[in-house]
Structure formats: structure tokens, C-alpha cells
Amino acid sequence: MAPATESHPTDDPSFGLAVDRYDLIQQQLIPGYGSLARLAVALLAASPLASEQGADVLVAGCGTGAELQEAVAQRPDWHLSAIDPSAAMLAEARSRLAGAAAIDWRQTTVEHLTEDPACQGRFAGALSVLVLQSLADDGSKLAFLTGLARSLRPGGQLVLVDLMSTSLPSLEGQLAAAWVGFQRASGLQVPAEQLAPLTQGLHPVGMARLTSLVNAAGFSDPARIFQALAFEGFLLQKPS
Ligand SMILES: C[S@@+](CC[C@H](N)C(=O)[O-])C[C@H]1O[C@@H](n2cnc3c(N)ncnc32)[C@H](O)[C@@H]1O
């Protein structure tokens, strides 16, 4: 595998501006954020391969460690690999998980990790929460999803949570206004320079495009398992 301290050109130091307040901001910004990691881990833990004792599980884009904390709590037997290209995010996750479990930490992207033959076909399951949305649909989304499919054993599942384009154009204005109302009611008060890395430059796609991308990457059709406004969660399977 690649060295754990590998630096990466896609590391974005600007994301570090929000790291200390990241969780609070996400809770105020994203409906259901407090349950996302718990639900994602519970779903994967019930999957055919990741339900096995001591399963290898990849947390792709671990951020400050929300999915890792849930994984350690729900499945202390899992062998976790946690990756993120952001040094600031990885450092925060490492400090929160210090001493909690033996986690294989790597500062890298999914795309780079899975260039390593040792990481191909290795994982029983993977979690990708709020990561794909930040990648442009210029080949970057496909490369990320292809890496995830490559990392899994045949029959392995991916829980994918992401911001989506609405499939209900007639409700687009109402849904956008509701999201602003949710943020206001949640007390979101964040300086523009801290909010920008979390809200700008996102690249949501619709259901048809997501289906085409995941199929091209080597997954079966996405099964939607939850939705809160435009944030949707899917279960994907690499065919056996
Ligand atoms: C919005 S955060 C989500 C973090 C965490 N999953 C959560 O739900 O709180 C997105 C994370 O994905 C990471 N990321 C971006 N591109 C990535 C890639 N190609 N591979 C792995 N992680 C990536 C970013 O550095 C960032 O920490």
C-alpha cells in the first residue's frame, strides 16, 4: 500500500479553515447530518460481506471522523481504512479517534489509493458520505466511483450519500427556500469565507446521471435508501 504520510497535490488547505467548526456547520447546513453516519454504518453492517466478523471497510473522505466514530461504536471488529486528501481533516479525525481502534490512516484520494494492487478487491464494504458532490462531472466523478468499485470485493457494497439535483423541477424553488429556512432555523451563522468551501463549487447530478456513472464504474443500479431535501443516500453493489 502507499505510505501513510503520502502528501497529495489535491490536498486543499482552505478546507482547514472550517475544520474546528466543521461538525456544527454541517449539522446546521445539512438536514439529517446527525444521523447520516449512524445510518450509513448500520446499513453497511447489515450487508452480506461487511456483516462478516473482522471485515475490511474503507471510509473514503473521512473528514473529521463522523463515520469512523460510528463504525468503531457499532462494529469494533471491523478493520478500518480511513482516507482523505486533506491533511487538516485527517489530523482532526486522527485526534478524535486516538486510541479508539487500530485504523489504517492514509492522506490520499480514492483514485490514488486504488492504483495500488494491494488495495484492489480488498474491501468488504465502503462508505462515501458527502464526497462525490465536490467532484466535477468531467471524468472526476467517474474516476472516484471507479476507484471505489475497484477497491471492493465482488459482492461488496458502497453506501453513498450525496447532494443531488432535484428530480422534481416544479418544486425546485420551494426546496431551495426550504433549505435556506432549515439553515436559518438551525441558527447557521458562519462567515462567508468559512462557508464557501462547504457550499460553493459543488457538482450535484440527477438520478439518471448518477445511475449512468455508477454503472460505468462497475456498480449495479443505485438503490435509494433515504432522502432529506436534496441529500440522498444510496446503496450500491459490485456484482459478484
Ligand atoms: C464534505 S467532507 C465530508 C466528510 C465526512 N464524510 C462527513 O460526512 O462529515 C468531504 C471530504 O472528502 C474529501 N475528499 C475530496 N475528494 C476526495 C477524494 N477524491 N477521495 C477521498 N476523499 C476526498 C475532502 O477532503 C473532505 O474531507
Image (tube, rainbow, N blue to C red):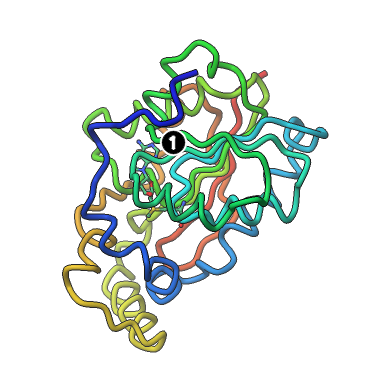
> Image height check: is 88 above or below 140?
below
- Front position in the image: 17 or 183: 17
Residue at numbered disc 1: 211
Give the left or right position of residue 16, taking residue 43 as reference: left
- At 73% across and 31% down in the image, what residue appears? 55
Q: Quadrant of residue 115?
A: top left
Q: Quadrant of residue 17?
A: bottom left
- Check the image and name the residue furthest to the top: 117
- At 54% across and 46% down in the image, what residue appears? 234
> Image height check: is 212 above or below 153?
below
**Quadrant occupied by the C terminus:** top right
- At 65% across and 56% down in the image, what residue appears? 70
Q: Residues within 10 Å of mark 1 (few under 14, many from 20)?
A: some
The x, y position of residue 129, in whole percent, is 48, 50
- Check the image and name the residue furthest to the right: 53
- Front position in the image: 207 or 77: 77
The x, y position of residue 169, in whole percent, is 30, 62
- Front position in the image: 107 or 189: 107
Give the left or right position of residue 170, taking residue 215 as reference: left
> Image height check: is 167 above or below 44?
below
- At 51% across and 55% down in the image, what residue appears? 95
Q: Disc 1 marks which amino acid?
A: Thr
Q: Quadrant of residue 141?
A: top left
- Front position in the image: 160 or 66: 66
> Image height check: is 222 above or below 68?
above
The response on whether ligand 1 sits within 8 Å of label 1 is: no
The x, y position of residue 7, in whole percent, is 31, 31
The x, y position of residue 23, in whole percent, is 44, 68
- Check the image and name the residue furthest to the front: 99
